[in-house]
Amino acid sequence: MTTITGGLVSAGASIAGASSVCSIRSDILDVEGGLRSRRIELVRFATVATPRLRARKFEVRAGVGNTFGNVFRVTTYGESHGGGVGCIIDGCPPRLPLTEVDMQFELDRRRPGQSRITTPRKETDTCKILSGVADGLTLGTPIAVAVPNTDQRGGDYSEMSLAYRPSHADATYDFKYGVRAVQGGGRSSARETIGRVAAGAVAKKLLQEHTGTQVFAYVSRVHGVELPDGVIDHEKLTLEQIESNICRCPDPEVAEKMIAAIDAVRVRGDSVGGVVTCIARNVPRGLGSPVFDKLEAELAKAVMSLPATKGFEIGSGFAGSMMTGSEHNDEFYIDEAGNIRTRTNRSGGIQGGISNGETIVMKIAFKPTSTITSIQRTVTRDKQETELRARGRHDPCVVPRAVPMVEAMVALVLADQLLQHYAQCQLFPADPVLQGTSSVKRAPTAMEEAAMYSEH
């Protein structure tokens, strides 16, 4: 047997007269900078002759797309109609108070079947921590979380095994891999986000315990119904306001109009999109990097990796392009506590790719759900034109359930950036006043806030 480890046969090697069968073996070696490094071996079984070969080693770095983060790293696993879904969290500091209750609180917000404007699929989404936590404290070792699937209906997808759903990942998964999980869309399903939300609960706990950072998201637009900017005071926004209705819009009157818009398309077998606004309060100054790893770039990548996302803006966003510099610039001043602040926040809490201590404000646009029961023209895998009326249980609008997903991804970025910042800049710390936040008061956790408003 001749093994060429990541090699190419040199020009002088002879393999004449050797009857052989070749195969490729690929092994994961390590993880560096978010990419999995693979060693590829070409294994040759010679039956007639075994020539001497000289090999030149090479290494293929292939990002397989299931792991997020650099220091606080999260890998999700599972398909929509498989045995279950979950995540592995690596890089979480030890001695962080954590229980399954912390995760379950967030998973219940994401759970299907919550109301008439979400998918009717019934899942309890009960999580189980398998490792990395003992006696209510993290150990600093990988945290494995599992959530079983219990309400699968594979028969709903018989037609979709042949015909591609328009604007769905069905076709592109086939184009790339040559195979796909038909039932529920596999990894393209929003059910994959269970792992993200569970990991996001850990990131939220880390941020709240250490820096008092809070991450809140809410629905600010459904189809043609919009909550105007400035109506919600982001410095006073509470979880109670967000969770006060099934649409998760903190303005009750606008929420009713949004719910009516979703109901109108739901009964027609259609769907609508919308916008989720997300804020992060009490973010430490200094998170992010000046060039390729700007904080807003990391946030954009994180939220745009969620299913159905189509747009991202931060601060003034596209509206800022219509302003002059004198109109757009956030002027500095010294507040009553002696902190450097900005009078406005058109930068959205980030300047030069680095957090400035003000509230981070961003918006994420979601397209209408692609799986609808209205008849649509499409093609089959064998290139036959046809029509498709999709079956299954799907959200008529994804944005109400996208709220905890967006919060989770933002929290994961901030936790990862916080740990990177400490590793780079806190060995020789600068003036703590400069590197503080606009508020140093510890914020209540989501669990604590929920308990507070449930008592009233």
Image (cartoon, rainbow, N blue to C red):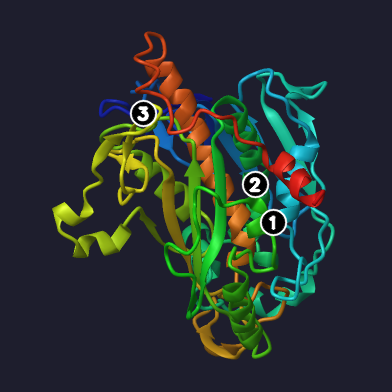
At label 3, the amino acid type is Asn
- Asked whether 36 or 434 is in front, the reply is 434
Residue at the image position 56 percent from the left and 52 percent from the top = 237
Q: Are marks 1 and 2 in contact (CB under 8 Å)?
A: yes
Residue neighbourhood size for the residue with mark 3, other residues' Cα within 10 Å, grouped as few (<14), some (14–19), many (≥20)? some
- Label 2, secondary structure: give it: helix
- Tell me how far mark 2 sits from mark 3, CA to CA: 34 Å
Q: Judge by depth and name the residue closer to the eye, 100 or 5.
A: 100
Left or right of 331: which side holds 9? right
**What percent of the width, then of the height, locates residue 336?**
38, 31
Cα separation, mark 3 vs mark 1, equals 37 Å
| In front: label 3 or label 1 | 3
Q: Position of residue 385 (x, y in %)?
A: 51, 88
Residue that numbered label 1 is attached to: 110
Classify mark 1: residues with Cα within 10 Å, few (<14), some (14-19) or many (20+). many
Which residue is at 55% across, 88% downward? 376
Residue 42 visible in image: no
Residue type at mark 1? Arg
Q: Secondary structure at mark 1?
A: helix
Check disc 3 and report its element: helix, strand or loop.
loop
Tag nearer the camera, 2 or 3: 3
Tag 3 residue: 339
| Residue located farthest toward the front when viewing the structure as drawn | 336
| Mark 2, residue position | 197
Q: Is residue 187 visible?
A: yes
Label 2 Cα neighbours within 10 Å, binned few <14 / some 14-19 / many ≥20: many
